[in-house]
Image (spheres, helix red, strand yellow):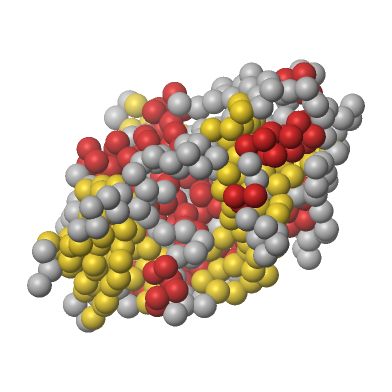
Amino acid sequence: MPDQHTPVLIVGGGVTGLSAALFLARHGVPCTLVERHPDVLPHPRARGLTPRTMEAYRQCGLEQALRAASYAGPDFAWRPVKADTLADDAYEVPEEPGEDDGSAASPTGFCPVDQDVVERIVRAKARKAGAVLRYGVELDSFEQDGGGVTAVLADRSSGAEQVLRADYLVAADGIHSGVRQRLGIATEGPGTLYDTLTALVDADLAPALRGRAVSMAYLQRPRPFTILMPHDTEGRKWVFGTGYDPAQESTTDYTDQRVAEMVREAAGLPGAQVALRPQIPGTDRTVLGFPIAAQIATEYRKGRVFLVGDAAHVWPPTGGLGANAGIQDAHNLAWKLAAVIAGEAGAALLDTYHDERRSVGTATMRQAMALFGSRMGPGADEAALDYAAVSLGYRYRSAAVVGAPADAAPVPPHLLEGAPGSRAPHVTAYRNGTVMSTLDLYGAGFVLLAGPQGAAWTKAAAGRGLAAHRFGADLSDASAEHGIGAEGALLVRPDGFVAWRSRAGSRDPAADLDRVLDQVLAR
């Protein structure tokens, strides 16, 4: 018999798993997260949050905390360079479209903050919201049936086992996802592009920079596929990475002394003092290896189990889109799980997680591969798209959207105007004398917005327990920016995406709204 029960079990305590715990807890869903490591990893990994990700965290009240923890100010700009060594007299700038991140179309901009810092901030907020987070515990096995998932958990220190029963399992257990493998879910895509080893380095490499601003250096020395990424603003803390062949050698072959010499060669500073820091809490491991790959799971859902983040998709880190996509996976899934668990939606709503997020994952993988080609070597199969369109202007087509356009290709975010399936537009508005973004209306539940003469819509929405606002009445008029007339309306989901829109009025708003809600919520 199970020792305990939880509505949702989350496996993996990286930024995606922690975000899933936070978003679920915010929706009132009790959840338990297990992470096999004893603490957050100190490696920075992702080094920034896109505006869309910041919007998701803004809904949880984390925007200011993340900005306060940022390693750079509001004038930060991402500056990738290519060279033989960091000390070269001239750097090459990768040829690709400018990375406008869409900040102008959002109430919040890009936040330059390291992933390990984000994880600590999100962890504290998730715990405060009621999520149970258990470190040093791993998933040993699981079985699912029509009523839930039975998981066997193992404490890595004591070896003690516990049987936990969950209604649903969210797998955030990374690129080698044991959950995905146990489910037999295949992956598609190029697969492993090369293998890399990484080290956290303390070394004064500022003399190589000579005052130049570098966010990421793609280098040819000591071998192709080498990177140096600053981990501070003074040029004294770095992340070093380079390709290696695990079939021919092991990370244990790379002693601290050997890696230190490679860092000197990459920096072009043969006399630099270099020291390595441990990367896994509770160990002295200074060098880690992992694949740089491009693959996407063929299924994001199987029964009561869902894949999020690297368990569902992985691509090169060029463009910084991996962690952001994982966080947005969790944001999309959380409100749907909450609605089904609360009995407000049918179980088929959960199918739309795969339908919506896999198509976005496929497009994002193509973008990352295009940027990889321009920055790290051979040309990509296709040109990079508008960065802001990929990171903020993606659109959904699923049963949880009524009337989505046939073309679901991402669009520049300044062109978002309330079409079903797209993120609702950001418009600066006045509400009760306070200046706000229309995006700040979303997050807790469905929201109906109506035109100045759409009182019948707001009345119907209020009668169904929905938050409702009328442009030109309790909210300054932004009906045109949302693509509706004076008598029109649109329905926005908790994740801020438009579920449905009526440009004009209706003879029976209550009946129309019931029909839309029944379809979107699979009732």
Q: Quadrant of the C terminus?
A: bottom left
- Identify the residue shown where x is 64% and y is 68%: 191
Pick the front one: 10 or 202: 202
Q: Quadrant of the N terminus?
A: bottom left
Asked if 281 appears above or below 173 in the picture, the reply is: above
Q: Is residue 120 left or right of residue 342?
A: right
Pick the front one: 59 or 322: 322
- Identify the residue shown where x is 24% and y is 68%: 151
Q: Position of residue 398 (x, y in %)?
A: 44, 72
Asked if 509 appears above or below 13 in the picture, the reply is: below
Q: Is residue 204 left or right of residue 431?
A: right
Asked if 400 appears above or below 200 in the picture, the reply is: below
Report which quarter residue 146 is drawn in. bottom left
- Identify the residue shown where x is 32% and y is 78%: 303
Q: Position of residue 29 (x, y in %)?
A: 21, 55
Pick the front one: 445 or 351: 351
Q: Position of residue 197 (x, y in %)?
A: 63, 49
Pick the front one: 324 or 425: 324
Q: How many marks?
A: 0
Q: Is residue 380 left or right of residue 122?
A: right
- Identify the residue shown where x is 82% and y is 29%: 268
Q: Position of residue 13 (x, y in %)?
A: 37, 50
Inspect this view and state whether residue 133 appears. Answer: yes
Asked if 182 appears above or below 97 in the picture, the reply is: below
Residue extending furthest toward the right = 89
Inspect this view and state whether residue 27 appears. Answer: no
